[in-house]
Image (cartoon, rainbow, N blue to C red):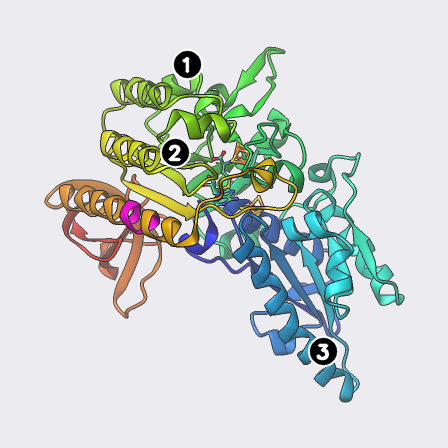
């Protein structure tokens, strides 16, 4: 699931320095991990005297946190850089400086090539080296062009400063927490193993400490993040090996943390303890994002997913057996090389069998350096378009039916923020749908019982029960 399909977060930093503070404008593309990373970069920059601004015109430093997952996402960065080059030139005329930095997965994948294509860029920094950001900026101010894309040997999480309490609060009552980064699965369509490196799990102690700090600042819901979050493992305080299920049991003990979620999972890493966590932990929300990509075994094999459609369906059955109200979500790719009409029909069949509450679907985009890009039998663009339309129509029907099935029911809602319209507040259902309520229904951070009165576009309307 990616950021452009959910809400866009802007990282904010409280003013905490003396003298005229330098200002940073940070723009985030891509997935939730980039949202988390942008916050950690903000924290690192705050410690270095920067204040966040959401007005690019005021910014001394513009930092794009980029995504490389599909061609469109990567190309967006270059059009944005074109605009920034012009802005930088205008500034130069009046003697004002503007530093342009590119972070994230495009930075990691393309490195120095970015500066070659866009010479206005001063700094390219990959996700493994964000703790070196202040030092890299000092070099830039000294007149160097800096490219930092090595995989750092030191643990960046040991070196990145923790956010201040005020910053945590300003970011809201829900928070992301990266527990695992990188991927060793090498699906043949995917750039992530190349942009995020091999799988690394953060330590139990680090994760618990960070979650406790979030809870103390007033965070009610934590979403654990990882490219393969359910492959997370670590050594617990008892000296035994923990998996994600065990970690969730421990996090559920933290006072104040009312809701836990995790994303994104791989079907091959759903172990018994994680399934048991769905059975036994009331704070683990009944929602699971479990991408399958295709319903055709032939295509799953070509994608190197290492499981069949039947394996996936069996797994969901096991999870539903222990947690019948769990809402399923997934990702799909249509038009992978070699996908025939029959393969695509198998995907439609699987979608009908699962019945998704929410799903994200994409046309296959060949990515440089991945095995898929070199495969034969690429699917014509118009065929991809047609398949995507059919799949999305089916998924949208399922999403609407799921929303409608909740009308008249009473559910728990975590109130998150003021609504777009005056007098409204917005919360989330256990199944991640935005729920719109009258502002008198409760305070931000409250979990209230609300009766669903109707459905909107991807959201629900409710009143306090
Ligand atoms: N780690 C997650 C997904 C990460 S990328 C997993 O294993 O499922 C998020 C989604 O982007 C993927 O699930 C996939 O559906 C989509 N995606 C990845 N590479 C793509 C490509 N080359 N073309 C189209 N969609 C892609
Ligand atoms: Fe990409 Fe596959 Fe790894 Fe997910 S599991 S990040 S799709 S390579
Ligand atoms: Fe994009 Fe990198 Fe996330 S490629 S989806 S920002 S891991």
Say which residue label 3 marks. Answer: 88
Say which residue label 1 marks. Answer: 272
Residue 388: % across, % down: 34, 49
Foreground residue, 264 or 313?
313
The quadrant where residue 52 appears: bottom right
Q: What is the spatial separation of the Cα atoms under label 1 and label 2, in whole angstroms?
A: 24 Å
Report the disc number at residue 35: none
Q: Which residue is at 77% across, 88% downward?
A: 93
Foreground residue, 390 or 158?
390
The verdict on residue 450 being magenta is no
Residue contact between numbered discs 1 and 2, judged by CB atoms under 8 Å? no
Report the disc number at residue 294: 2
Q: Secondary structure at mark 1?
A: helix
Q: Answer with mark 1 or mark 2, whichever residue precedes in sequence.
A: 1
Q: Is residue 169 visible?
A: yes
Residue 95: % across, % down: 79, 85
């Amino acid at each position: 699931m990616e950021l452009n399909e959910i809400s866009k977060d802007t990282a904010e930093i409280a003013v905490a320095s003396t003298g005229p503070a330098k200002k940073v404008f940070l723009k985030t593309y891509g997935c939730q991990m980039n949202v988390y990373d942008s916050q950690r970069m903000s924290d690192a920059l705050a410690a270095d005297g920067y204040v966040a601004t959401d007005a690019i015109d005021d910014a001394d430093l513009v930092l794009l946190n980029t995504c490389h997952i599909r061609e469109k996402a990567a190309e967006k960065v270059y059009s944005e850089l074109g605009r920034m080059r012009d802005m930088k030139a205008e500034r130069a005329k009046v003697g004002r400086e503007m530093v342009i930095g590119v972070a994230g997965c495009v930075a990691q994948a393309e490195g120095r090539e970015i500066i070659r294509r866009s010479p206005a860029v001063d700094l390219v920094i990959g996700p493994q080296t964000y703790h070196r950001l202040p030092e890299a900026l000092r070099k830039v101010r000294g007149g160097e062009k800096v490219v930092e894309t090595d995989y750092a040997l030191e643990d960046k999480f040991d070196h990145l400063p923790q956010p201040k309490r005020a910053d945590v609060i300003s970011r809201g009552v829900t928070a992301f927490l990266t527990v695992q980064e990188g991927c060793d699965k090498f699906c043949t369509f995917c750039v992530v193993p190349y942009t995020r490196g091999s799988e690394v799990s953060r330590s139990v102690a680090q994760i618990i400490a960070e979650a406790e700090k979030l809870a103390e600042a007033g965070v009610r819901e934590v979403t654990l993040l990882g490219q393969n979050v359910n492959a997370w493992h670590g050594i617990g305080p008892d000296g035994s090996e923990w998996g994600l299920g065990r970690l969730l049991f421990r996090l559920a003990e933290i006072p104040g943390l009312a809701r836990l979620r995790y994303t994104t999972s791989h079907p091959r890493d759903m172990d018994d303890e994680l399934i048991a966590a769905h059975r036994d932990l009331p704070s683990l929300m009944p929602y699971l994002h479990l991408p399958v990509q295709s319903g055709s075994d032939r295509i799953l094999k070509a994608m190197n997913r290492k499981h069949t459609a039947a394996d996936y369906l069996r797994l969901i059955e096991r999870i539903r057996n222990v947690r019948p109200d769990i809402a399923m979500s997934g990702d799909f790719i249509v038009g992978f090389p070699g996908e025939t009409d029959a393969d695509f029909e198998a995907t439609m069949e699987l979608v009908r069998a699962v019945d998704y509450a929410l799903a994200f679907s994409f046309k296959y985009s060949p990515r440089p350096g991945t095995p898929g890009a070199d495969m034969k039998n690429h699917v014509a663009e118009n065929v991809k378009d047609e398949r995507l339309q059919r799949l999305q129509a089916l998924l949208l029907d399922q999403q609407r039916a799921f929303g409608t099935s909740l009308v008249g029911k009473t559910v728990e809602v975590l109130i998150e923020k003021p609504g777009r319209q005056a007098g409204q507040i917005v919360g989330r259902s256990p199944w991640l749908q935005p729920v719109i309520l009258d502002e008198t229904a409760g305070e931000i951070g409250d979990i209230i019982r609300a009766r669903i009165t109707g459905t909107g576009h991807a959201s629900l309307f409710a009143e306090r029960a």
